[in-house]
């Protein structure tokens, strides 16, 4: 079986299926199609499937022209029918892995996808999980379900984990040129997963097991979450000490060794950094261990939106204004610059708290035309002199490139800057994080 799959990979006759067509799955499908494979994308969302089949990209990192070309060539197709798995040789699972309200992992999407794979599992298939999850998921959740088919891993079918490393909006690193970590249930599984990804991705990093690969992803994002938590707390400390935290960071960053620059901000956003460390923390609690760094960093990072709202109150106090009834203009809703992704965006928490204090909240984000929040729909406003002058306070939350900072400083009554966008401007109406 293994040699047959290796031959199919080498000859580009391997038929590929990608389950889940979000920020991870669609770019992966495009990458394999561009590498010469026949690819079927599967998703339960009919709207995504219809758009993709029409060659219309809903992911900022994928150009519609490129998608149209691949669809027209017949290299790439999309469906909601899991029956397509009967005809494929390799399956990558790229489904969401959110947290429950209790901060416990929700692996229901993984379980559902695995059940579909088991229904259509046949000899000679390679299955790879890419969804971020806790260490042990591949061999504790996927493996038993798939072996219930009567087939044996490492002989009849092959199973591995390879964490996604998607950074939306990154102009330098995408799916093809970001190193890919792979770890299989057996050595044969790892070998096949390496060959599979090497056919489409530039650099492959094999590890000894699926658990190591799962833990690698969690270390990457926990590292960032903890260090962002540290620098956020440093920002709070600097305010109490009447020190400019941005100047401190700039000075520390001149050290050529032993220091890595992290930036404070209004809170964590995106699917990975605010979520993934909790998978590790939850897993360790089942082993009677408290992941203290993770818990503390989460506490600090989750408090930052409230800290920003307090800054808004301070800015309004300087005008002898109450937050109740004040007009607050939030600039930037996406969790990072130049993307449309609002998952876990701190802007959402900031807006919700402002509204709870009875502020009149307006927002602009050219990447996010509308926003459903607290049972209402808000719409992005065109940034104009009139809009900025009408706002009692402007909150700079996301540092999109299109913002004219000089104009914002000139037209505003007061500014709360969470991203150091007003760097170089000296004005008493600017309140920096």
Image: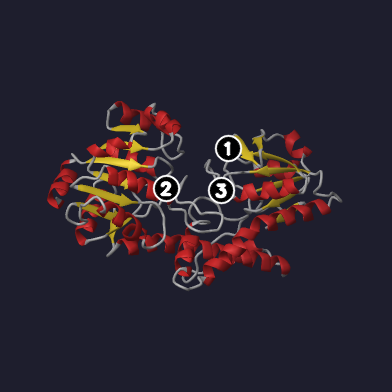
Q: Secondary structure at mark 1?
A: loop
Q: Secondary structure at mark 3?
A: loop
Q: Is residue 41 above or below residue 106?
A: above
Task: Give the crowd class for mark 1: few <14, some 14-19, many >=20 residues within 10 Å.
Answer: some
Determine the image quadrant of residue 56: top left
Determine the image quadrant of residue 75: top left
* 381 relative position to 166: left or right: right
What is the distance, in whole Å, between disc 3 and disc 1 at their CAs?
Answer: 11 Å
Disc with the residue nearer the chain's start (2 vs 1): 2
**Residue 173's x, y, as percent?**
40, 49
* 191 relative position to 339: left or right: left
What residue sits 56% from the left and 37% below the top? 367
What residue sits 84% from the left and 49% below the top? 321
Task: Give the crowd class for mark 3: few <14, some 14-19, many >=20 residues within 10 Å.
Answer: many
Q: Is residue 68 above or below residue 358?
A: above
Are dots 2 and 3 in contact, CB under 8 Å? no
Name the residue carrying label 1.
Answer: 368
What is the distance, in whole Å, between disc 2 and disc 1 at their CAs?
Answer: 26 Å
Q: Is residue 253 above or below residue 176?
A: below
Task: Give the crowd class for mark 2: few <14, some 14-19, many >=20 residues within 10 Å.
Answer: some
Name the residue carrying label 3.
Answer: 335
**Residue 229's x, y, as percent?**
57, 64
Residue 109's disc is 2
Residue 250 shows up from this direction: no
What residue sits 15% from the left and 52% below the top? 2
Residue 92 shows up from this direction: yes
**Residue 312's x, y, as percent?**
75, 52
Q: Mark 2, mark 1: which one is toward the viewer?
A: 2
Disc with the residue nearer the chain's start (3 vs 1): 3
Disc with the residue nearer the chain's start (2 vs 3): 2
Closer to the camera, 138 or 3? 138
* 311 relative position to 222: left or right: right
């Amino acid at each position: 079986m293994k040699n047959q799959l290796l031959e199919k990979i080498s000859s580009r006759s391997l038929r590929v299926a990608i389950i889940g067509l979000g920020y991870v799955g669609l770019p992966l499908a495009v990458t394999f199609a561009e590498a010469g494979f026949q690819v079927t994308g599967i998703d339960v969302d009919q709207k995504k499937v219809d758009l993709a089949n029409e060659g219309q990209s809903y992911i900022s990192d994928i150009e519609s022209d490129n998608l149209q070309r691949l669809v027209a060539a017949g290299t790439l197709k999309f469906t909601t029918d899991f029956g397509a798995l009967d005809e494929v040789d390799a399956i990558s699972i790229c489904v969401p892995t959110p947290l429950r309200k209790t901060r416990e992992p929700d692996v229901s999407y993984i379980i559902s996808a695995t059940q579909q794979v088991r229904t259509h599992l046949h000899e000679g298939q390679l299955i790879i999980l890419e969804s971020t999850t806790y260490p042990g998921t591949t061999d504790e959740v996927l493996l038993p379900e798939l072996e219930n088919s009567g087939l044996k891993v490492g002989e009849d079918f092959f199973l591995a984990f390879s964490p996604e490393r998607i950074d939306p909006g990154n102009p330098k690193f995408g799916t093809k040129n970001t190193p890919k970590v792979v770890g299989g249930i057996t050595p044969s599984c790892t070998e096949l997963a390496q060959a599979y990804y090497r056919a489409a991705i530039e650099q492959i990093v094999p590890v000894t097991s699926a658990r190591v690969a799962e833990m690698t992803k969690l270390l990457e994002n926990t590292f960032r979450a903890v260090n962002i938590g540290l620098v956020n707390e440093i920002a709070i400390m600097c305010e109490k000490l009447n020190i400019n935290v941005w100047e401190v960071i700039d000075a520390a960053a001149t050290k050529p060794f032993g220091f890595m620059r992290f930036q404070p901000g209004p809170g964590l956003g995106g699917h990975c950094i605010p979520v993934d460390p909790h998978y590790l923390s939850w897993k360790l609690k089942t082993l009677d261990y408290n992941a203290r760094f993770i818990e503390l960093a989460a506490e600090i990072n989750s408090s930052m939106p409230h800290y920003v709202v307090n800054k808004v109150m301070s800015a309004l106090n300087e005008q002898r204004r109450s937050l109740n009834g004040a007009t607050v203009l939030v600039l930037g809703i996406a969790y990072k610059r130049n993307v449309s992704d609002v998952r876990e965006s701190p802007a959402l928490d900031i807006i919700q708290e402002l509204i709870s204090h009875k502020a009149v909240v307006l927002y602009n984000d050219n990447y996010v035309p509308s926003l459903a929040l607290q049972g209402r729909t808000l719409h992005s406003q065109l940034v104009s002199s009139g809009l900025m002058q009408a706002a009692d306070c402007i909150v700079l939350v996301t540092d999109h490139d299109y913002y004219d900072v000089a104009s914002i400083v000139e037209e505003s009554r007061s500014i709360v800057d969470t991203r150091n966008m007003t760097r170089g401007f000296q004005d008493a109406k600017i309140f920096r994080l």
